[in-house]
Image: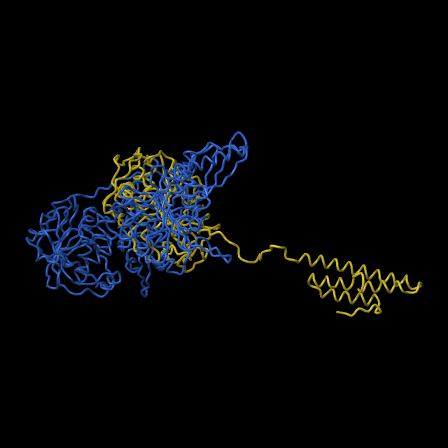
Chain colours: A yellow, B blue
Amino acid sequence: MTTMDPSVGTDRARALFDEELAGVTSAAALQDLRNRWMARSGSWVAAFMELVASAPPDQKRALGRGANTLKKHVEAALAEREAALAATRRPAGAVDITLPGRAPRLGCRHPLSLIREEIGAIFSRLGYQVLEGPEIEDDYHNFEALNMPADHPARDMQDTLYLETPLTPAAGDPPTRGLAPRAPQPLTLLRTHTSAMQIRQMERHDPPVRLVAIGPVYRRDSLDLTHTPMFHQVEGLVVGRGVTLADLKGTLLSMATALFGPGQDVRFRPSFFPYTEPSAEVDIRCIRCNGGGCPMCKRTGWLEILGSGMVHPAVFEYVGYDPDEVTGFAFGMGIERVALLKWGVEDIRLFYENDLRFLEQFGR
Amino acid sequence: MKVLLSWVREFVDIDEPAEAIGRTLSLRGLALEGLEPMGDDALMDFDVTANRPDCMSMAGVAREIAVVYGLPFRAPSMRVGAAGPGAPDAGAPAPPSPLPAMPITIESPDLCARYVGAVADVTIAPSPAWMADRLSACGVRPISNVVDITNYVLLELGQPLHAFDHARLAGPAIVVRRARPGESLTTLDGRPRRLTSDMLVIADAERPSAIGGVMGGADSEVSSGTRRIVLESAWFKPQSVRATSRALALRTEASMRFERGADPTIQAVAMARACELLAQLGAGTPGPAIDVHPVPHQPTPLHLAHARVQGLLGMPVPADEVRRILAALGFEVAPAPGGWSVVAPGWRVDMHRDVDLIEEVGRHHGFEHLPATFPGVEQAPAPSDPRIARDARARKVALAAGFSEAISFAFIEARHAGPFQGDEAAVALANPLSEKFAVMRPSLVPGLVEAVSHNRRHGRRDIQLFEIGTRFSPRGEMRAIGLAWTGLATPDHWSGGRRDVDFYDMKGVVEQLASLFDVELTAHPPAAGSVAAAVLVPGRAAALTSGDRCVGWLGQLQPAIGDAHDLPASDIVYVAECDLDPLSPTGIAPARMTTPLPRFPAAVRDIAMLLDESLSAATVRGTIRSNAPATLVSVTEFDRYLGKGIPDGKVSLALRLTFQAVDRTLTDGEVEAATTAVVEVLAKKLGAVRR
């Protein structure tokens, strides 16, 4: 703090004031500064005014101008600083806005549920009805009507889980067409594929048909990195006049693009399923290397994703459709397989552990 | 099917490397599963689909290669007499031997359409190295020249052969018949087999010496002392071989081929090849083959319309190309109106309809030529399963309430299911994978408790999980939502307010779920013997009803159940389960017309009543409702107080009463009178005193 001495002149006094003002950071210090410079008596400004009053007449005018300029400067600077200090002052009841908020707890979606929903949405957009169906099935719908009669070797392709005691089906709408036994059959097994829903839908409805059936299926597979005894499947079926294998390719390409992004391609490899003819395994372009070859696709550039084909005429005969009138395509895809590929999950068992550290990675 | 490239090359002149062949064939229907380079040679492992038994041989795979690469194929029938590798310069064929003819009788022509037999004098010795090496490479253990020749022909042509020790056959005779009651046979693997009358056997004059198409008998097995054999090359009915193989749990290289369907035209060719090899190896002198053929192969011509090819595939295939492909595959193709009349060769047992032919045309023309088109829409899409949208709404409520979504196996351990079955039986599996997956879950809660336990073991304290899925009972399937909650009621926060989850947290979530579907749930003490009584802590358990239907339950999990899932005893877990179908089968709450907003203000009065502690809030609310003045629009409990100033056995219950009229503003006098009426009803009916 400087000692008050008006003899230094107004210019020097102004410099001293500016120096002091620069050091002021609180309202109290500002008030002190104001008192020492502006008080009616005993302040710097008061001292200069007294100097003017007692000056000889010929000097009054010049001294007075200097004193007034200093006073105006001090007043303005004090007001400016006061306003600046007020702007930084914490208002009463202020909170620490940097502390964490009270977040409502939101649950996480299961990845399989997300894929299920996504596939349902893709096919809804393409005009398909989305169906679920019974998980405990009769032999007729799971096998026989899919062109796998009792002694068919293809039954070995799927190791079936059977019930100890068959259940009696609920009385419902009986099938209106086809070769299905009119009396409901005992429910003896856990469905090995969602294809059973194809039959249930066709034997109750005239063509055209355009559906996907989604849900859990069961096979007697031991748990390992890529197998679980329960998994989820989506089954697609389109039946109408003039439906072709090329239509299947377009549809699957559209699905692959929606699921895995633009630039997708699909590849058909001839295969065998009892309920389709021709049959094809379908590969998508490897989503990691985009076809260049990497460990994920075993350097082939392609990833196997589903089985498909043109509905076998025998299946149409089972459900009472005329194979000379209509054709159709069908495909079946594992939901887990899609999830494994899409998110780079390396162990399928993670989907059934329900470990929150895993589930929380899929967002809310 | 393991295929040796050098062996295949005896049928087709293919110069491509094995890797390229594998890649190409994978796109034509034979998927390469493995590839093992062997010097100049290579062992290719193909995944042969169940419909293609013709590819379970070197010749069959060679034929596919020939078609794919447009190369000539040397048919097996043309090769008999040609030298194999390592053969001595074949001179003149051996002169006919004076061997005795073998009487062959087929008593069951429905199961055995053809039986070619031949007698041969043999000298048992090890096979030459080239043959033993080929067999070993393909996974067949070399045994002796005679046995190895039967296996060699099987791998080469796909026709299973069998050799009997002539000296061990009574008669000697071959009788192909069904097994007789009580007959049994010890098979080559040394195991006694009890035979049934639907099984086909190859018998001598007295008893079975082989199970047709499955396995030979130990007694007539060719051994080092064998001097004379009977060779068999036969065709057995696929369904019969499959049924026998399954019944005996006995799968062999032979049964795998017969049950898929062997070529009914190749038996004599295979026999000739075997006899040729016997002579070539110096292993024996065969006599003439006897061909008993009661049911000749009569293929049905199939009509293939050219328009149907494009109609099914959606890509054009020129007529010349259709002809070329089918002819190369061995089909007889003759022109017919609009297309062709096609006869399948004997080895193509999978040809039944025109679509089978179209698949052949499609895969060999190349699926890569398929354009990507879309099926036309003929009518508006049919509605989806309403449960999907309903479940999605329930899922949203659970997620918003902080529960993460779980998906568990639908089969669980029997001991975990037991308490959740009530008085119903388990839905048990006949052939479960293990004890862990023995019964279908009667409730979603055991799976959720297991998941809670898993997360607790991995360091989590606060866990909220739900699952929407199917639960099972002998009555059938029910879609339900299950919830489990342990730890803090709300996330931990620096501002405090830590509180563990309690009954009312869980009840609130269930109430929200019910209100989503416009359903009112009522909580009752669980009935004795019910699931809720079995799995929940008494006094903190509620059975939930809608109308008179029981739809679920909620409360604190019995520690014993947590313990069975390895949960710490100190953990308090609240659980709930609600069936979704009774709440809303369609997912759509009944449409409700809106009510106009009230035009006159409501008046609110709070009253505190001193009541017997044993009286439930539902009783108090019910008493008020059934005696309420018309202007009372809602009653809410807003405080419940026990303790200082409240006599023992009593509770202070504070109620907020809201009064409103549709046609006027209620006067203070009216509101006071209505409030007094409520207080009086409570005093009169429940002995309550206003505080």
Residue B591 locus on image (x, y percent): 44, 34
Q: Identify the residue at image location x=47%, y=50%.
A: A261
Residue B112 horizontal side relative to residue B12, left or right: left
Residue A296 locus on image (x, y percent): 41, 58
Quarter of image, res B147: bottom left
Residue B120 horizontal side relative to residue A159, left or right: left
Quarter of image, res B583: top left
Above or below, A270 against A243 in this view is below
Depth check, front residue: B495 or A227: B495
How many badges with numbers are in the image? 0
Above or below, A9 against B32 in this view is below
Residue A109 locus on image (x, y percent): 43, 50
Residue A286 visible to an observer of this rendering? no
Residue B463 visible to an observer of this rendering? yes
Quarter of image, res A203: top left
Specify the quadrant that holds the N terminus of chain A: bottom right
Depth check, front residue: A235 or A314: A235
Residue B551 horizontal side relative to residue B602, left or right: left
Q: Residue at the far top: name it.
A: B663
Depth check, front residue: B43 or B609: B609
Residue A129 locus on image (x, y percent): 40, 39
